[in-house]
Amino acid sequence: MGIVAKRDGIMIEGTTAEVEKIMVSNPRRIGEIRLKINFPHPILDKDQVKLERAAHTCPVSGSLHNDLNEIVEFIYPKS
């Protein structure tokens, strides 16, 4: 997301993320990860699409095990 924001001039400074992991057994591992990405500034709809696409296709996400369920919530302020 940072690369896309910088390239397209999208202001994401001050953005925070909350991460929650959900454990499963047999074998014991992280079965689900929940992310809440909070943007402090209004972002145009077209830019939201770009940022969300970048988040869902990032190399980190692609490096995680296929059995890991990822839930990402993007929270934008009301403009």
Image (cartoon, grey):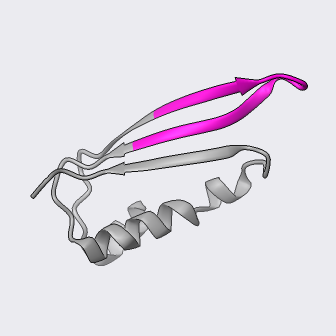
Q: Observer-nearest residue: 50 or 23?
A: 23
Q: Majority secondary structure of the magenta segment?
A: strand
Is 19 rendered above or below residue 54? above
* Quarter in which the C terminus is drawn: bottom left
Is 79 rendered above or below residue 10? above
Is 46 rendered above or below residue 65? below
Q: Position of residue 13 (x, y in %)?
A: 24, 51
* Residue at the far left in the pictured view: 79
**Relative to 17, 15 lies left or right:** left
Does 24 appear in magenta? yes
Determine the image quadrant of residue 45: bottom left
**Relative to 1, 45 lies left or right:** left
Q: Observer-nearest residue: 73 or 5?
A: 73
For the image shown, how many numbered marks are present on the structure? 0
Q: Observer-nearest residue: 31 or 1?
A: 31
Please report the residue visible at 37 percent of the width from the left and 72 percent of the height from the top: 49
Please report the residue visible at 29 percent of the width from the left and 72 percent of the height from the top: 47
Q: Position of residue 54 (x, y in %)?
A: 48, 67
- Span colored in magenta: 19-36
Please report the residue visible at 79 percent of the width from the left and 46 percent of the height from the top: 67
Q: Position of residue 31 (x, y in %)?
A: 73, 34
Determine the image quadrant of residue 5: bottom left
**Relative to 20, 17 lies left or right:** left
Determine the image quadrant of residue 18: top left
Please report the residue visible at 39 percent of the width from the left and 66 percent of the height from the top: 51
